[in-house]
Image (cartoon, rainbow, N blue to C red):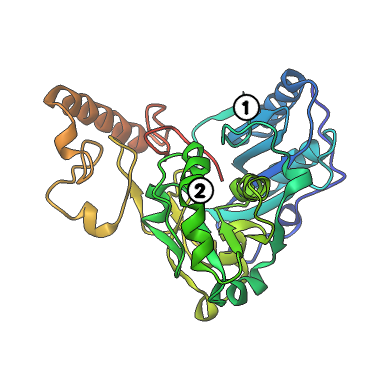
Amino acid sequence: MVAIVTDHPSPTAVSPPAGALPVCVAALYHFTPFEDCAAVRERLLEACHELGIRGILLVAREGINGTIAGSDDAIGQILAVIRALPGCAGLDVKYSRAPALPFHRMKVRIKREIVTMGVTGLDPRRDVGHYVPPEDWNALISDPDTIVIDTRNDYEVAIGTFRGAIDPGTSSFREFPQWFRDRREALVQEGRKPKIAMFCTGGIRCEKATAFVRAEGVEDVFHLQGGILKYLETVPEPQSLWDGECFVFDQRVSVGHGLKPGTFAICHACRTPLSAAERAGPDYEEGVSCPHCRGERTETQRQRYAERERQIQLAERRGTHHLGLPLPASPKGDTKP
């Protein structure tokens, strides 16, 4: 059995806010070298199952990344287990709340990278850019000399981003290095002094993106500490420069200011986030199709989706989860904070 350590309880495990939603959601990542990823995976999977936690954790030789959900006490205990892993004492965690568990299973997977960029030789622990806390972010991105880049994927940017940010239009983080190399000259010319500020959901993609950009020879590189999630939690909405909602890789689909659950839903056919207006349109059929995929699916596929949706509804009426319910993700299967 895995020993459940309690030396480092989560703040939410001690005192959740009055009237808070019942489920604690923890988004986390940490770059640290793991020698035995299989042993780390086994320890985490056993502990999560014992504590009734659901979600996904990715383990690689470069560290750990993921989002998990459970009771406040369970999250506090599993974070203590993670912080006891080699080099993880300084683990950074972003908390939010949900009305129910936003995951159906618990998965711990071993990967080559905890966020896949596909560029060898990068070390975010050594080459990371300048961290900018949320309270200082507005001043940085309001500077006309600052080039602001959203490092997330196109379907994430579509539902919300910072005012004036450049959307690379990438469908996968793997495409970011080539996009930057193709645009580098034009980007540098946009600012009188090359100064690049980047952001992502929780910070992990920016850790790699800033390391990459610095390796490309740009020194003045900044990124939002704690990512969009920390900004939405910290900066009051009247002072916010964020427009829209923030996509998250779980059944909540999106969150807004104060990390309140958002208004988007997921298309169970193509896994694209959908606004209320899109769901009200003629091309939307719950579980079967949406404006993004209506013309791309065969009648056989739509019939299969309709049967799956029927089974999902039956499971909900029984008070259980249908394991065929797809989690929000891109068509390429990205699952990163």
Which quarter of the image is occupied by the N terminus?
Answer: top right
Packing grade of label 2 (10 A; few <14, some 14-19, many >=20) is some
Q: Looking at numbered disc 2 in the image, what kind of residue is underneath it?
A: Phe
Q: Nearer the viewer, mark 2 or mark 1?
A: 2
- Seen in the image, is 257 located left or right of residue 154? right
Query: Residue 33 appears in which quarter of the rendering?
Result: top right
Q: Are marks 2 and 1 in contact (CB under 8 Å)?
A: no
Q: Residue at x 42, y 32 (%)?
A: 321
Residue that mark 1 sits on:
108
- Please tell me which residue lies in front, 252 or 41: 41
- Seen in the image, is 293 located left or right of residue 230? left
Quick one: SS at disc 1?
strand
Give residue 251's position: percent from left, percent from top.
44, 44
Marks 2/1: CA distance?
A: 31 Å
Q: Which mark is residue 11?
A: none
Residue that mark 2 sits on:
180
Q: Looking at numbered disc 1 in the image, what kind of residue is underneath it?
A: Val
Q: Earlier in the sequence, mark 2 or mark 1?
A: 1
Above or below residue 275? Residue 106 is above
Give residue 102's position: percent from left, percent from top.
49, 43
- Seen in the image, is 57 located left or right of residue 335? right
